[in-house]
Image: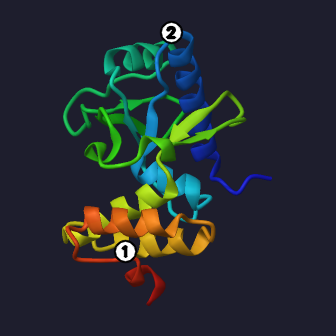
Amino acid sequence: MSAYRPEFEAALRLLAQVSEAMVARGLRRPILVGGAAAEFYSESAINTGDFDLCTFRQPELEEEMVKLGFVKPAGAGQLTKGWVHPQLKLGFEVVAETPMDGAFDPATLVLVENTGAGSIVLISVEDLIADRMGQYASRTAPDRLAQARALFALHSSLDRDYLARRIRQETGGDYGIEILESE
């Protein structure tokens, strides 16, 4: 039995299919970032409403999504930046060409195999925690500190030096790793 919500698992399988299609075209897999990465690393303890992706090849990615049944919502009150699949409640959106405005180490990307439909790529949990801390530090998302702390607590084998450096980068030096260790 999986720790993930069924709708999240279904979205992961579709992302894996899209990723495999990109590889079949000789292109890189999209990179999963944001709330969906947080849900993945927390085994659905943190929930998301969408899948944020990074890719340099957005037109090709969207072609593959259309082949799998994704559509762009249209009309009043609809998000027009993202894509939805009729069988999912979660949307997909390309948010950037590269994660973290390129401030991450590409060697830290994580390839996850056997998602039921192929493999996916995610940013590292360290970069995800740093991203949550950057959003918290900006004062636009106060709940991100709790997410960063939850992810920190769930992953004991973190690269603490890399994480500390990335938190300082993402928060403009306002916070360090110690904020994750205290309540």
Marks 1 and 2 in Cβ contact (< 8 Å)? no
Question: Quick one: 121 or 117, which is closer to the camera?
Answer: 121
Q: Is residue 95 left or right of residue 62?
A: left
Disc nearest the viewer among 1 and 2:
2
Query: How many marks do you count on the picture?
Result: 2
Residue where numbered disc 2 is placed:
25
Residue 123, above or below 153: above
Visible residue check, residue 90: no
Helix, strand, or loop for circle 2? loop
Residue at the disc numbered 1: 145
Q: CA distance from mark 1 to mark 2?
A: 39 Å
Q: Amino acid type of disc 1?
A: Leu
The quarter of the displayed image where residue 135 is located:
bottom left
- Please state which amino acid type lies under the numbered disc 2: Arg
On screen, residue 106 versus residue 157, left or right, reads left
Camera-side residue of 56 and 79: 56
Report whether residue 134 is seen: yes
Q: Residue at x 35, y 20 (%)?
A: 57
The one nearer the camera, 80 or 30, is 30
